[in-house]
Amino acid sequence: MEHKDYKGIISDFGGPTANMYGYECNKKLQDGACEHQRCVDSERLCGAMKINHARNINLLSRIRSAKGVKKAFVASGIRYDFITADKRFGYEYLKTLVKYHISGQMKVAPEHTNDRVLELMGKPGKETLVDFKKMYDKLNKEEGKNQFLTYYLIAAHPGCTERDMYELKNFTTHELKMNPEQAQVFTPTPSTYSSLMYYTEMDPKTRKKIFVEKDPIKKEKQKEIVVSKCNKKFKSGFDT
């Protein structure tokens, strides 16, 4: 707070898991991570993880009232599926963000919108994103703000075909009403299910073979599909 270059603005105190502060799985704390399941898997949130944004709401209030803080923004790290899942405090938490802690835009990470690809990613279905966007837009309207959402998207994830990317493009254009300016080509990283799928070309849960794009040129093509400026509605008849 006393640094000579500090102007009273905290640009981002979200981090990679901005709204996971203040709650944890008691089973995990006692016994460690489960070997047979994920905490979050597609549409299913493990019942042992009691999502509760109450302490996070209190933390935001304390930060706003801290001496020397003029503005404090949460620019990243929001799990929107946790907000929609928290029926007690999720709405209040998002309202607090919209009112005090967003600097024009909030970035969330649906990564894709094809439910089959999302299942492989362990991400919630696209309807969760739609529900969150409706809530976000409603709160912005109530607060008289014009703050928008941006989206972190991935191309060429294991299981993803060009046809799936055209479907994603259609969804961003006609459902989200925006044109993505960037997307990231999937890169394998150690100790992840996605990397396991990339190298084995197999769904680790079903042991069934899945398509994995490994051609660098075709990976870039998948990316270009979704960032294209073309707003034409593509038919779903594209093959890989």
Image (cartoon, grey):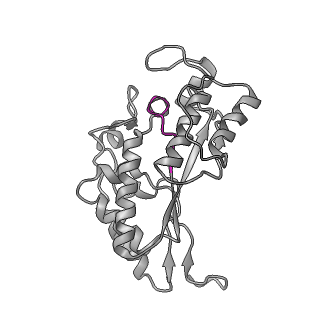
In this picture, which residue range is highlighted in magenta?
109-118
In the displayed structure, 8 sits above or below 168; it is below
- Please report the residue visible at 63 percent of the width from the left and 21 percent of the height from the top: 199
Q: Quadrant of the C terminus?
A: top right
Q: Residue 76: where, in percent of width, then height?
A: 52, 59
- Please report the residue visible at 50 percent of the width from the left and 20 percent of the height from the top: 203
Total tally of numbered discs in the picture: 0
Residue in the foreground of this view, choosing between 143 and 239 = 239
**Is residue 107 at all visible to an observer of this figure?**
yes
In the displayed structure, 32 sits above or below 132; it is above
Q: Quadrant of the N terminus?
A: bottom right
Residue in the foreground of this view, choosing between 64 and 78 = 78
Residue in the foreground of this view, choosing between 23 and 151 = 151
Q: Is residue 53 left or right of residue 149?
A: left
Classify residue 127 by image quadrant. top left
Residue in the foreground of this view, choosing between 69 and 121 = 121
Assess whether residue 40 is covered by the magenta stretch.
Answer: no
Q: Residue 221: where, in percent of width, then height?
A: 71, 34
Q: Residue 213: where, in percent of width, then height?
A: 66, 25
